[in-house]
Image (cartoon, rainbow, N blue to C red):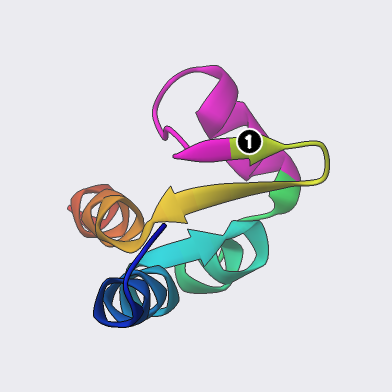
Amino acid sequence: MYKPKERDAIKKFLNEEILNTSEALEILGFTRQYLNQLVKTGELEPMKEMPRDRLFLKEDILDFQKHRRK
């Protein structure tokens, strides 16, 4: 298993660098339907898909937002 320091580092990474669908939508200002379309077409790739949610790297969402504005 993980040692306490490793566990804390993992927890910190997840809290600071991983976004769920709602958090990604808040940053991007998109509708859930549009985000689903972006995932379906491969423009955005979630790190993990679950039945009712997806997890994204914060860096991917911010990069997408940055390039989208240009």
- Let me know if residue 19 is in the magenta part: no
Indicate whether 64 appears above or below 50: below
Indicate whether 22 appears above or below 35: below
Tell me what residue is drawn at x 26 percent, y 81 percent: 5
Q: Position of residue 36 (x, y in %)?
A: 66, 35
Q: Which residue is mark 1?
A: 49
What span is in magenta? 33-48
Indicate whether 29 appears above or below 30: below
Compared across the picture, whether 59 is left or right of 34 comes to left
Query: How many marks are shown on the rendered structure?
Result: 1
Front-most of residues 8 and 1? 1
Q: Position of residue 1 (x, y in %)?
A: 41, 57
Front-most of residues 54 and 64? 54
Front-most of residues 11 and 26? 11
- Mark 1 neighbour class, 10 Å CA radius: few under 14, some 14 to 19, many 20 or more: few
Compared across the picture, whether 57 is left or right of 63 comes to right
Q: Position of residue 4 (x, y in %)?
A: 34, 81
Tell me what residue is drawn at x 45 percent, y 50 percent: 56
Tell me what residue is drawn at x 44 percent, y 39 percent: 47
Front-most of residues 37 and 9? 9
Q: Quadrant of residue 62?
A: bottom left
Q: Amino acid at mark 1?
A: Glu
Q: Residue furthest right?
A: 52
Q: Position of residue 58 (x, y in %)?
A: 34, 62
Indicate whether 6 appears above or below 45: below
Query: SS for tag 1?
Result: strand
Compared across the picture, whether 63 is left or right of 30 comes to left
Q: Quadrant of residue 21?
A: bottom right
Tell me what residue is drawn at x 59 percent, y 63 percent: 25
